Image (spheres, grey):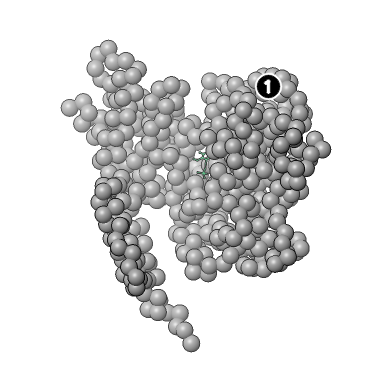
Amino acid sequence: MTSTHPAAHPALARAVHHASVWLEGLTTRAVNATTSLEALRARLRVPLTRQGVDPERVVDDLAAATEGGLLGSPGGRFFAWVIGGTLPSAIAADWLTSAWDQNSGMYATAPAAAVAEEVVGEWLLDVLDLPRDASFALVTGCQMAHVTALAAARSGVLRDAGWDVERDGLFGAPRIRVLANATRHITIDRALRLLGFGLNAVQPVDTDERGRVTPEALQKALSAGTGPTIVVLAAGDLNTGEFDRFQELIPIAKSAGAWVHVDGAFGLIARASATKRHLLEGVELADSWSTDAHKWLNVPFDSGIAIVRDRDAHRTAMAVHASYLVSSDDVARDEMDWNPEFSRRGRGFALYAALRELGRDGLAQLIDRCCAHCHSIVTGIGALDGAEALWIPELDQGLVRFLDPRSGATEEDHDACTDRIIGAINATGEAFFGGVTWNGRRAMRVSVVNWRTNDSDVARTIEAARHALAGASA
Ligand SMILES: Cc1ncc(COP(=O)(O)O)c(C=O)c1O
């Protein structure tokens, strides 16, 4: 009989060791990468041997070769892009997912995975308070969640116009208009490209000074045309965390017969917090929603979620049939009927673990804590000499700008100064930020979506910014 003791799997034992060293070092190691591109290439580009290499040596060598080439993004002082951390049970469940290696495309190939996803779907609809009978798919990220949800939207609005897009495609179909928040995320555009809408289908809708679609602009855009229409709104702007005013906008879109899709990559999760929920009032009226588990739910990559009110449209857009497959005939979940993938990872296990570990209160506290830390970092750095808070967050995303101290400095000088100071902070290894051009000017983005970020991280981060500013003016 084969032993299941870890000693029988030295490579796994080595992985546990290296992972522990990595995770424990997150508070002390530099957050930025400290090894050059050339060095990483030289270390990793070893000869591919004929005989292969012992598994434990492969693992040890991999850990050694990547040293200094990994960003400390799972740690508490990484605030670039929107990159969540990883909860301990979610990492462990992710490892088990690999060890179990179930093809989670259907119940027949992975019964436990199908049931775990079924439960995760119920939990998500419950904590996000979305229609409990909505369908869902666990996909690779919000990008593919948009593709999945907008494929359902395409199917639904064309079905209502008397056209079967699954059978007849888009050639000759009634043209679909997509009215979208002018500040939408680029993954919306890519989803529309992949789905054959073409970027010319998009009509950007004007926003107010806070980047929110205005009811007047939406009404005007809707009245300017006819035919199948999809409206795309934002639950959490990438730079500001701002929300469209769903309660006002969605009824306007619905009364014009439009399908409303919401990009809630991180912001939709805020609905699980009693203190932030009011920001998303009315979002439940939409037809489809995209969000991520690898951002604010702190599940390892890659984990996105598509949710669709019209189950028939969703299933019609995705389902596949072949005689060699085993359909569970609606008795159990066959993921491939809802997902764009065929063979796939058992994505539900890590999400199941994260939600159980957090519980309802833990999730709400995670959201509130991240928002409070984001506020402290933006106001703390913004109060330093040579800095200015551009967007003081209500959610978990804020903006800071750094000012060139020379008299007569122009906006372009401040832009260059902002990028310089971001680079200088990152070079300290203490904290890591990204930049963005926002309203035509360079700014530093502050994105806090990690359960690990704590008061000490906030203090160290503000100190790193003070140090970078002092170095720049010296
Ligand atoms: C608002 C928004 N939408 C969509 C995405 C894309 O998400 P993903 O990278 O999971 O595909 C992001 C990523 O940051 C985002 O911030």
Residue at 47% x, 84% y is: 2
Q: Where is residue 386 in the image (x, y as percent from the top left)?
A: 29, 24
Whether residue 210 can be seen here: yes
Q: Relative to 397, does residue 430 appear above or below in the rendering?
A: below
Q: Is 77 situated above or below 24?
A: above
Badge 1 local density, few (<14 within 10 Å), some, or many (20+)?
some
Residue closest to the far top: 408
Q: Residue furthest bottom?
A: 1
Q: Which residue is drawn at 43% across and 21% down?
A: 440
Q: Is residue 244 visible?
A: no
In this rendering, position of residue 456 left or right of residue 284: left
Q: Quadrant of residue 425?
A: top left
Q: Mark 1 points at which residue?
A: 221
Q: Where is residue 105 in the image (x, y as percent from the top left)?
A: 63, 61
Q: Using residue 254 as the reference point, say whether residue 184 is left or right of it.
A: left
- Viewer-closest of 390 and 163: 163
The residue that appears at 59% across and 41% down in the rendered structure is 194
Residue at 58% x, 51% y is 139
Of the residues shown, which amino acid type is indicated by label 1?
A: Ala
- Tell whether circle 1 marks a residue whose Cβ is less than 8 angstroms from ligand 1: no
